[in-house]
Every structure is written in C-alpha cells, then in structure tokens.
Amino acid sequence: MPKQYSALLFSLLLAAGLLAMQANALDLNKALKDAVKDKIEEVKNGGETAVEKTPEAPPIPVPATPIVTNTSAATSAEAPANSINWKNPSVDEEIALGRNITGSLLGAAPLVKDDALQLYVNKVGRWVASQSERADLPWKFGVIESADINAFAAPGGYVLITKGLYQKLSNEAQLAGVLGHEIAHVVKKHQLKVLQKQQLLNTGSSWLKEKFAKNNKLADKAIGSGAEISARSLDKDAEFEADRMGMVLATRAGYDAYGLAEVLQTIGQTNKADSSVALLFKTHPAPDERLAKLGDSAGSKLDNLKAGKTLENRLYKLN
Amino acid sequence: MKNYLKKYLLISLAAPILALAGEAGTALKADVLRAEPFADAKTAGSLNKNDTLDILAKKGAWLQVKSKSASGWVRILSVKRGGASVSGSSIADIASGRAGTGKVVSTTGIRGLSAEELKAAKFNEDEMKKMESHAVSATDAQSFASAGGLTSAQMAYFKGAK
C-alpha cells in the first residue's frame, strides 16, 4: 500500500515537473528523460526526495514473492517486473532480473554444447570479476551459439559472449578484456538503470504517456522483462566507461592490458555491412572512437606497466 | 639526464622491441611522435588524425611508426591497425561470407541475434540451468589464475576523458 502511495506521489511529481517544463517550451522528450534520470539519481543517492517521507533512505522491504529461486520456470518467465522494488532493487532482485534477461537470450541462442569451453570461460570471467568491487556476486558466464560478434551483460552478474566473437580471439588476455567490459556494465549497473528508468516512466501514469506519446520515444518503447534490453543501446558514455574499466580489470587480473583494445581493433576491421556486427554496431560507438577514447583516458598510465600475460596457449580452442 | 638514462635502461630491459614487418595503420587522433618509446623523449614530429602509417616495431606501450612526413614512437592506443582501407571488403566477400577477416564463416544453421529476434526470444529454463551449472567459485578461479602464472595487481580505474 505505501508503495502504491509513493508511486502515485511520484507520478504527480513527475507530471508537475513536466508541465512546468512544458511552460518553458522545452523539448518534452528530453525533459521527460531528464526528469526520470534526475529522479533515479535522487533515489540512488539515498532517497532524499519529496517522494520519501523520511530524510534517510528507509530500509524498503523486499517483496515476499520468491523471485530468486531457480527451481521452476514459473518463477522466471514474466514474473519479476511487477514485484520488484524499482526504486531501490535489492541484490536478489537485481539477480532475478538478470536471470530473466539471460534466460531469454539463451532462448534466442543456446549455449555452445561444450562443457569444457563453458567452464574455461567461467574461470577466466570469475577471476576478472574478482578484481572488481562486486566480486561477491554469483557471476556466471557463457558462450552462446551465434555467428554474431557480440557480448552481453545482464544485472546481477550474467555475461554471455557469442561464439562468433569467441572465434575472433587469439589469446586469453583478449577474452579477459571482453569479459572485463561486460563485468564493468554489471558493476556499474548500466542495464539495471535503463530498466529502472523505464519502469519509473511506466509508473508515471498513463495520461501523461498519452499526452506526450508523440514526442516520447521512451514511453513508446517499453522494454519487456526479457532479452529486449540487450538489443538496446546504452549511453555512449556507459560504453566508454565499460571499456576503460574492462581494460583495468583485466590488467588487475594479471593479463596484458591491451586485450580489449586488440579485440576492438579486430572488430574495427570487420566490414560494417557484415550482418554479424549489425547489432553490435547499432548499439555501440564505432570501434575507432572507442579506441581513441580509451587512449585518451589511459594517457600515460600504461607506459610503465609490468608486462601482463597473454596466455595464447591456454585459450580454449573450439572445434 | 641521469634519470632519463635510467628510465630508458629500465624500459629497455622490461620490454623487447618487436619488429613488425611494415604492417599498415592509421592515426586515430592527432598525436606527438617521440624519438624514443617514452613520454618525455624528444619530439620527433606529429601525426594528424587519419594519417596513413607503416608500423615498424612495438615496444611496451609504444609503436614505432612512419608517416609520409615523419617517423617516431606513439602510444599503441593512438593507432588503428590494419590501415584505413580494410573496412572496404568487396561485395563478393560479403556474399561469400568472407567479409572482414578473410576467413570463411559459415552462418548456416546458426541464428543471428537481431533486435527483433531478441525481442521475440522466450525464456529457456533448461539452458539457464545449464549455464548455472558451469559457474565456478572465486576460489577455483584463483587456482586457475595461479596455474597460468597470473597474479593480481593494484591499478586505479581511469577517469573518463573529455
């Protein structure tokens, strides 16, 4: 009940804010996005908003629904979206969301049937994740049966890489770099924030949506709780951030620092018209731009690094 | 000067120069060319964005390159390897599945992952369970790392560049 109450308050607040902005004849689409972005920031920073009644972020109870159990399909398919505390999801809720998204991705492309490969990727991935601030998440990695060149992260520590991308790799440091990029998305909750934004918008009342439907792409494109999020672009800045964090995570793990950069070089040499990179290029900045940004961010910090390991001999060879 | 020499010696010992037989490259951004592979070495010229380069050698974080007008050392991340023309594979290459790498990639029987396919995807509990069964513990990952001679090191994240 209090949840609904605050949702109502929130939508009124959002509406009020928007109307005020409308008076200023601002771009409504952007305004709506920004309003929600600010709202998420506020909520994230401890809930010091007009929505909250207490000055400190209160311990918001986790819904009793057993959304985290991995015992039955019934709990997974469409369940989480409605029962999640979107303002401040718990780690368990985050994992449940990620499981749902990842399970749907696996519905589109199953795991490569090679247990040794899957185990190998989990070992590399888990080691790189251990260098992050969220080492304690139940990290899970997988290689999926797809000729596409891509990799995906979902909230809570789920990471998938396509067979197409895996086959482009020439050493373990490159795999570590790619997984590092995806791990960074999870650590920074990039996908989770997109889902939260979307959900808060949905809560924002239907008349608002109706009113601004023409201008509002976000409201038009509601994200389901499945794999659809994986087809969406994150902010460019989120990708650049994941690149520089991924590079550092792999380096921390003892690998050659340039693994991710080498993979970006390889991807950059793939023809843009090749369908295997269609989704990747649609959802990510161009590899050249990513490399240049990475170079700008790294500056002189790689100059005196102790050489890391590439471990080309240990890279698991696919049949 | 003494410091400079010491540093040079240190880097020389740490990273061997790898000669690269004239691989093509492109400057990803405007940058300074250095006479030696380190940041405070003498300026040897400059690169403009998109300059075509010959990559001559690699040493630590640096590549030795030669442009039309100058040559010297520049950081690895300032160079796109493989030249500017690589992205223009022929139509025939695309049609035969040879686009990009020169390797034949068979796509028969493997589904793509387009936005539409992802949107339509249905949750697969069996595959999810299989994925969960492959998970390893942090301790196992640590042993795996040690077996490969990997040791973890401290390193701060980079700040975002403008």
Image: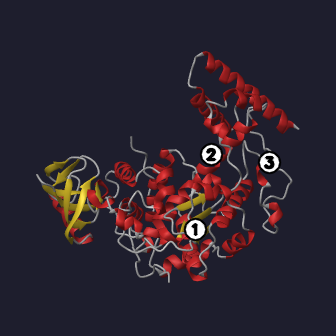
Quarter of the figure that contains the N terminus of chain A: top right
Coordinates of residue B122 in the picture (x, y in percent): 71, 62
Residue bearing the label numbered 3: A82
Coordinates of residue B109 in the picture (x, y in percent): 57, 74
Circle 1 sits in a helix, a strand or a loop, which is it?
A: loop
Q: Nearer the viewer, residue A121 or B100?
A: B100
State if disc 2 and disc 1 touch (CB < 8 Å).
no
Circle 3 sits in a helix, a strand or a loop, which is it?
A: helix
Q: Residue at x 57, y 30 (%)?
A: A30
Q: Tell me the mark number nearer the camera, choosing from 1 and 2.
A: 1
Residue bearing the label numbered 2: A194
Chain to which mark 1 belongs: B
Coordinates of residue A6 in the picture (x, y in percent): 80, 33
Three-letter amino acid code at the position of disc 3: Asn
Residue bearing the label numbered 1: B111
Three-letter amino acid code at the position of disc 2: Val
